[in-house]
Amino acid sequence: MIVGEKVTLRALNQKDFEQILEWVNNPKLKYLTGTLYPVSEIEHETWFKNKILDNKGKIFGIQDKPNSQLIGIIGLKNMDFINRNTELYIYIGDENYWGKGLGTEATSLIAKFVFNELNFHRIYLSVFSYNERAISSYEKAGFKKEGVMKESLFKSGTYHDIVLMALINKG
């Protein structure tokens, strides 16, 4: 476990399966993550097992410390051990915890882990330009905008930009 002031990052387990399936089918969250189609239990089971067993990535549950409730997920993918960089993804699935700084703390915790324990040099991510709350959260955690992929996302009848951000280990 990776323990912070307000959240703990922990391994996922089978009891988290149903909660995450509910989140990935939430229309508000789908808009922020880019999921297009409804996700079936069978599809989710395959995704869940593959994420847990992935040797090029790692997924954690984000748990609220006061009540030990799972509130989201955070993970690393495309882990490149030669060039020492990895891609980050995160979402707070429980809407009751949106806007409370818990995603920012989880992002900071995983960054410290990636830099201090895995000895990686760079963490990068992509985020939809209309997800201003996420962009602000990443900036609070130290991420900098590196580029923009103009009009590369078609959502709700409109083209949107995708913002590329990264955090480099200076220490």
Image: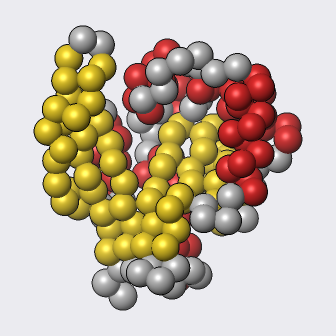
Give the quadrant of residue 38: top right
Would you say 54 lies left or right of 144 here? right
Residue occupying the far right of the picture: 14
For image coordinates 22% across by 35% down, the residue present is: 152
For image coordinates 41% across by 81% down, the residue present is: 83
Residue occupying the far top of the picture: 157
Above or below: residue 43 compared with residue 148: above
Report how many numbered discs are placed on residues in the image: 0
For image coordinates 58% across by 81% down, the residue present is: 117
- Colour style of the rendered protein structure: secondary structure
Would you say 82 lies left or right of 56 here? left
Residue occupying the far bottom of the picture: 171
- Residue 15 makes an appearance in the image: yes
- Residue 6 makes an appearance in the image: no
Above or below: residue 65 compared with residue 28: below
Name the quadrant of the C terminus.
bottom left
Q: From the viewer's side, name the closer residue of 161 and 23.
A: 161
Q: Position of residue 145 (x, y in %)?
A: 20, 56
Name the quadrant of the N terminus.
bottom right
Q: Position of residue 115 (x, y in %)?
A: 48, 79
For image coordinates 77% across by 26% down, the residue present is: 42
Would you say 39 lies left or right of 169 here? right
Give the quadrant of residue 57: bottom right
Q: From the viewer's side, name the closer residue of 50 and 91.
A: 50
Would you say 45 lies left or right of 144 here? right
Q: Position of residue 95 (x, y in %)?
A: 53, 25
Above or below: residue 79 compared with residue 90: below
Above or below: residue 155 compared with residue 2: above
